[in-house]
Image: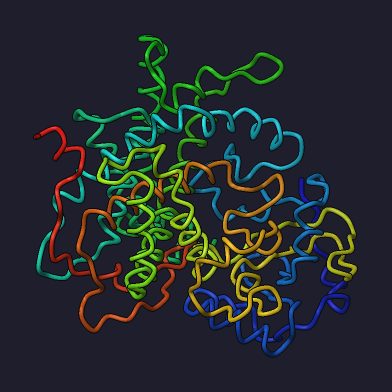
C-alpha cells in the first residue's frame, strides 16, 4: 500500500503554477511539450505540477544528478508501480508496470531472460521477414501515412515473437481486436480516471471493456492449448514465460500471464512504432545522414542481404536512432511515488509526492547537450553518455525490460526501409508533435512519398 500525500506539505515543494489542477490537465493533454517548456522557463530546472484525478503533486527534475538520485534510490522507497496506476484498466493489476517492492523484483527476474541472448538473432530474422512483406505493398507515387504501416509491422512482430501466433482465424481475430484496442487508447482522454468507466454501450470505455473480455477469452484458450500440446520447438516469449518458474518453484498463473502479455503489447507496440516514425522523419530531412547510413550499410555487408548480425554492426545507424530518441522521446517522463521523506537533487521532499525525471527536458537540457534542438547523431559516437542524461526507456531497476528487443527491432526495420525504399516526406509536410495516449508522435501519421521500392536482397539472391 502506497503512502498518501499530505497537502499540509505543499509549502515544502518547489515552485510551480497555481493554475487549477483541471486546467493543468487540459494543457498537459493538449500541448504537453509547450507546458513543460513554459514551466521550466518560468520556474527553473525543478518545478511542481498539479494534476487532477487524485494524482499527487509531481516534482519535475531535468538535471542528471537529480535523475541519478531517483534511479539509484532504494526501489522500496520509490514506487514506480504506483506512478503507473493510470494504466491498470488496460494492462491489469499483475502487470510488471504496476508492481513495486519485492514482488516487482521477483517478476522482473522471471520476465527478463527471453529478451536477451542468442534467441534475439532468431527474432531478428522474423523482424526482417515481416518488414520486407509490408514494404512490398507500400504504395508508389502518392503520399501515405507510414505510421500505419510501421504499426502493422510492429504488431505482426509482436504476434509472432511474443505471442507465438502467425496465421489462422483465431490469430486474425486477435489481431483485429488488438489493433482496435490500440486505436481506442490512442485518444489521450482515456487517461482521465473519471472517463475510465462504462457510460453506455457506444462509449469508448464500454467498447474497450467488451474487446478486453474477448481478448482475455482468446488468450486463456491459447494458454490451455499450449499446456495440452506442449512447448517443444517453440521459442516465442509466451511459451518461455509459461515454462518459467519463480525461485519457490511456482509458475505464472493465467491472470498474470494475460496481464504481462498485454503489458508487452502496450509497452512494445505504440512506443516502438512511434520511435521508428520519428527516426524516419528526422533522417528524411537530412540527406547527409541518409548517405552516411547507406555508406555504413555497404561497408558492413556490401551487396549481401542485411541479416540480424550485420545490422548489429551498424554503429552509425544505432547513433541515429539514439539521437532521434533524445530529440523526440516517445514518453515525456517517468515517475516514482516517495514512500518516505527523501532528499533528491538537493531538495528534501515529503512522502507521497511523485518525483518525476522528465525525459524530454533532460534530453533537451543545454547544460548536457550543446545545441540541443539540432539532430546530430555523432553525439553518441563522440562521447560516453550516462544513463542519467539519456533514458528514453526509463532507468534503474525500472528500465524497460524490452529495451534491447525494441532497439534491435528498430535497427532491422529501419535498415530495411532505408535500404529498399526511395522515400521522402510528403510535399509540404512539416512534422509536428501530437499526443497519442501516453506517447508523443509525428502529426498526421507521418505522410511520406515512396518513388520506388527495390526487391529485398534476399529475394534477388534467391531468384538468381
Residue drawn at the location 64% of the way across and 16% of the way down: 250
Residue at the limit of the structure toward the bottom, as seen here: 42
Q: Is residue 347 left or right of residue 257?
A: right
| Image-quadrant location for residue 113 | top right
Q: Is residue 274 left or right of residue 113?
A: left
Quarter of the C terminus within the rendering: top left
Q: Is residue 244 left or right of residue 69?
A: left
Instruction: Examine the rendered structure and indicate whether residue 62 appears above or below residue 175.
Output: below
Q: For the image shown, how many numbered marks are present on the structure?
A: 0
| Image-quadrant location for residue 271 | bottom left
Instruction: Examine the rendered structure and indicate whether residue 82 appears above or below residue 232.
Output: below
Residue drawn at the location 70% of the way across and 65% of the way down: 356
Residue 124 x %, y %: 38, 36
Quarter of the N terminus within the rendering: top right
| Image-quadrant location for residue 419 | bottom left
Nearer to the camera, 24 or 307: 307
Instruction: Examine the rendered structure and indicate whether residue 270 appears above or below residue 29.
Output: above
Residue drawn at the location 69% of the way across and 76% of the way down: 49
Residue 398 x %, y %: 67, 47
Residue 214 appears anywhere in the view? no
Residue 107 appears anywhere in the view? yes
Nearer to the camera, 45 or 424: 424
Amino acid at each position: 500500500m502506497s503512502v498518501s500525500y499530505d497537502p499540509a506539505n505543499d509549502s515544502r515543494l518547489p515552485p510551480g503554477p497555481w493554475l487549477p489542477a483541471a486546467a493543468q490537465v487540459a494543457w498537459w493533454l493538449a500541448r504537453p511539450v509547450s507546458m513543460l517548456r513554459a514551466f521550466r522557463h518560468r520556474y527553473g530546472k525543478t518545478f511542481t505540477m498539479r494534476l487532477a484525478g487524485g494524482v499527487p503533486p509531481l516534482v519535475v527534475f531535468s538535471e542528471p544528478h537529480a535523475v541519478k538520485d531517483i534511479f539509484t534510490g532504494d526501489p522500496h522507497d520509490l514506487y514506480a508501480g504506483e506512478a503507473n496506476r493510470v494504466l491498470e484498466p488496460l494492462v491489469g493489476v499483475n502487470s510488471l508496470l504496476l508492481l513495486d517492492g519485492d514482488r516487482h523484483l521477483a517478476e522482473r527476474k522471471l520476465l527478463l531472460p527471453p529478451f536477451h541472448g542468442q534467441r534475439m538473432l532468431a527474432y531478428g530474422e522474423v523482424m526482417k521477414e515481416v518488414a520486407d512483406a509490408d514494404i512490398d505493398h507500400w504504395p508508389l507515387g502518392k503520399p501515405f501515412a507510414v505510421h500505419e504501416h510501421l504499426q502493422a509491422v510492429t504488431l505482426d512482430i509482436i504476434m509472432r515473437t511474443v505471442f507465438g501466433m502467425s496465421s489462422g482465424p483465431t490469430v486474425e481475430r486477435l489481431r483485429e481486436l488488438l489493433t482496435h484496442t490500440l486505436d481506442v487508447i490512442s485518444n489521450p482522454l482515456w487517461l482521465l480516471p473519471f472517463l475510465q468507466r462504462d457510460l453506455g454501450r457506444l462509449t469508448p470505455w464500454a467498447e474497450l471493456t467488451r474487446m478486453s473480455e474477448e481478448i482475455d477469452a482468446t488468450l486463456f484458450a491459447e494458454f490451455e492449448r499450449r499446456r495440452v500440446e506442449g512447448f517443444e520447438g517453440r521459442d516465442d516469449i509466451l511459451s518461455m514465460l509459461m515454462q518459467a518458474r519463480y525461485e519457490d518453484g511456482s509458475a505464472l498463473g493465467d491472470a498474470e500471464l494475460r496481464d504481462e502479455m498485454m503489458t508487452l503489447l502496450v509497452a512494445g507496440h505504440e512506443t516502438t512504432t512511434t520511435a521508428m516514425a520519428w527516426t524516419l522523419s528526422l533522417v528524411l530531412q537530412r540527406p547527409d545522414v541518409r548517405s552516411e547510413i547507406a555508406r555504413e550499410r555497404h561497408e558492413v555487408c556490401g551487396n549481401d542481404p542485411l541479416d540480424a548480425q550485420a545490422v548489429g554492426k551498424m554503429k552509425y545507424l544505432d547513433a541515429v536512432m539514439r539521437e532521434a530518441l533524445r530529440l523526440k522521446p516517445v514518453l515525456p517522463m517517468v515517475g516514482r511515488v516517495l514512500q518516505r521523506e527523501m532528499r533528491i537533487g538537493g531538495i528534501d521532499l515529503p512522502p507521497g509526492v511523485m518525483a518525476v525525471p522528465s525525459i524530454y527536458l533532460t534530453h533537451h537540457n543545454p547544460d548536457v547537450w550543446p545545441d540541443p534542438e539540432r539532430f546530430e547523431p555523432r553525439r553518441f559516437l563522440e562521447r560516453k553518455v550516462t544513463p542519467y542524461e539519456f533514458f528514453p526507456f526509463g532507468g534503474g531497476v525500472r528500465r524497460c525490460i524490452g529495451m534491447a528487443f525494441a532497439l534491435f527491432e528498430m535497427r532491422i526495420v529501419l535498415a530495411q526501409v532505408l535500404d529498399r525504399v526511395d522515400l521522402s516526406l510528403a510535399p509540404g509536410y512539416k512534422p509536428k508533435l501530437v499526443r497519442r495516449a501516453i506517447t508523443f508522435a509525428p502529426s498526421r501519421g507521418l505522410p511520406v512519398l515512396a518513388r520506388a521500392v527495390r526487391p529485398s536482397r534476399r529475394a534477388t539472391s534467391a531468384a538468381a
